[in-house]
Amino acid sequence: MKKIIAIAIFLLVLPSIVFAAMDPALKECVQRGYETVFQNGGNYCVLPDKSQCSIEEFNNGSCGAQYKTENYCIAEGTFVWDTDKCCAGTEAYLAGKTLGQARCIKVSLAQKVYDQFRYNPYILFGSGLLIVIVILGILKLKKRNV
């Protein structure tokens, strides 16, 4: 019996474990649409002119300052930390109770509702339990009235 309970708990928790969030130090480089590379033991931001700055230097403005403009929006499909920076028509979204990094995407209300059920088994279980309770209540009332 203990094994069955342990397996059931594992199966309930498993769907919520999906991705890990990205390093926030990469935010300034990634949100602007620049590529990041890991080399020589550190992360580097590859700028439009193909020059590279260490992430720390890019973030503090000592390298690549001409590429750190404030007027930008984050393209669809790109990771996002600042949710107000998504380009028009997209929004920062991370499905259900998944772990990871939000992306700017076009997402419908139907997709958001679907993802809540898909990635949060507690909602599905709770909804099913509520339906069963309502049906049992109706049957009990019908039985009482007969």
Image: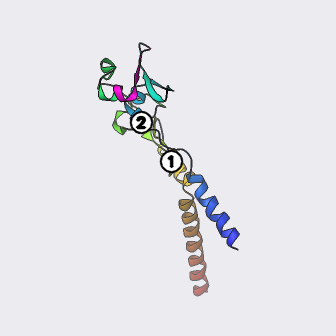
Point out residue 65 in the picture as x, y percentages from the top left corner.
30, 20
Q: Which mark is residue 87?
A: none
Q: Is residue 36 magenta?
A: no
Q: Which mark is residue 80?
A: 2
Secondary structure of the residue carrying numbered label 2: loop
Using the image, determine if residue 80 lies above or below residue 95. above
| Residue ID at (33%, 21%) | 63
Q: Quadrant of the C terminus?
A: bottom right
Q: Nearer the viewer, residue 106 or 95?
A: 95
Distance between the alpha carbons at the discs numbered 1 and 2: 14 Å
> Can you identify the residue that label 1 sits on?
99
| Residue ID at (54%, 65%) | 126
Q: Quadrant of the N terminus?
A: bottom right
Q: Nearer the viewer, residue 49 or 96?
A: 49
* Residue 138 falls left or right of residue 108: right
Q: Is residue 53 magenta?
A: yes
Secondary structure of the residue carrying numbered label 1: loop
**Which image quarter: residue 43?**
top left
Amino acid at dot 1: Leu
| Residue ID at (34%, 37%) | 84
* Residue 94 falls left or right of residue 11: left
Magenta segment boundaries in residue numbering: 50-57
Query: Most extreme residue toward the top, as rendered?
Result: 49
